[in-house]
Image (cartoon, rainbow, N blue to C red):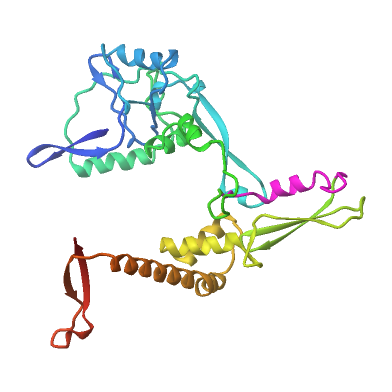
Amino acid sequence: MAAIDKREGPCGTKSKKQLGKYCVAGGPGNISCKNNSTVQGISMHGFPKTEGTLRNLWIKFVQRHRPNWQPSPYSTLCSAHFEVHFYLQRPDITVNQLDTDNSFQTKKMLDRKIAYPTIDTVQPEREVHNISDREHRKILLHRRFVDQPENTNQAVQFLPEGLYTMEEEAEENDYGNDEELNRATQNTISVPPNVKCQDEPKFIVFYSTLLSLFSLFCFRCKKDKPTVKMLRNGTMVTVTQYCDACQAKSFTWRSQPFVFGRYPVGNILLSFAVLMAGASISKVLLVFKHMGLAAYTPRSFFYHQSRFLIPTILMYWESYRDSLIDSLKNVGETVWCSDGRFDSMGHSAKYIHHVLHNHP
């Protein structure tokens, strides 16, 4: 979907196509709603996917001014057509919460389970005169310094600040609505038996959740509130329970298995993933730092690279090359074509690089 922005040039009206979604609602006098996803303060909402009463209410609202209209998979309505009570408040983390005051900022998003459009925001177009770019900039500058809008009894096209933030982030980036996101991300995990550790799914676990789990009771004598101690080894955490009631040997749990007898497998897999992706270890560790994820140092990455990763890659390449040579030894009555490359001009072709193709 696209919105059209008309600009006046020296040769007349010129249309500039902008990417984004536009509102399909109409209004009195065969005038369409001008709002789109590029308008500040406006968020776009897609039609409900499932057939039912709620979807019919959305369609009938548009058909009031556009008879026989039917929605497409990309049809959207702007936030100006929904009443305020159709929005939900939800707490979202703010920068201040990263300090010590634990403050929250409330954001509102459309309750798609019950929300349906009711407001006609389109007003008859007024005759306007073309203005120069300089005058247009003056008007925009003047609007920027206006503190309070004028009072009006007409339906407005902008919702109060904060009503559109969450839905705008989801709709404008084509991430789909909340129902689709939940269906796509909340899947039942099923892992077949004897699956290798590198193939099983991994998760991000918070410190508080681990502490609350291991502080419930002693895993040996089932007494309440044991002492819990956590040690970090790169991306792995080791949790140890100490119970004063049973005086038994401490219970130890590790978040990852070991490879080669001493190395956490998550550390090796992280180094392998960074190397295979061609990423920068410093940038990856910076992402981990900003998110608060436990990780190792760059020195550990280069140790894994020289000790495990590069030798494994070379061993695999040599094995793969030998298998190709063995398969070619059994090929007979074929035609070979060669293409020489990477030869220095004026020098011997003894060390030229040949690319061979087999034509049976």
Q: Position of residue 293 (x, y in %)?
A: 59, 56
Q: Which residue is at the front of the view, 139 or 6? A: 6
**Which residue appears at 41% of the width and 30% of the height?**
149
Residue 223 belongs to magenta span: yes
**Quarter where residue 239 is shown:** bottom right
Residue at 49 percent of width and 69 percent of height: 309
Residue 162 visible? no
Q: Position of residue 211 (x, y in %)?
A: 74, 49
Residue 273 higher or lower than 143, as above or below = below
Q: Which residues are magenta?
A: 202-224
Which quadrant of the figure has residue 29? top left
Q: Indicate whether 180 appears above or below 234.
A: above
Q: Is residue 175 left or right of residue 114?
A: left
Q: Is residue 300 above or below residue 12?
A: below
Q: Is residue 315 above or below residue 112?
A: below
* Rendering coords of residue 104 (x, y %): 61, 41
Q: Is residue 337 left or right of residue 297?
A: left
Q: Quadrant of the C terminus?
A: bottom left
Asked if the magenta segment contains residue 15, the reply would be no
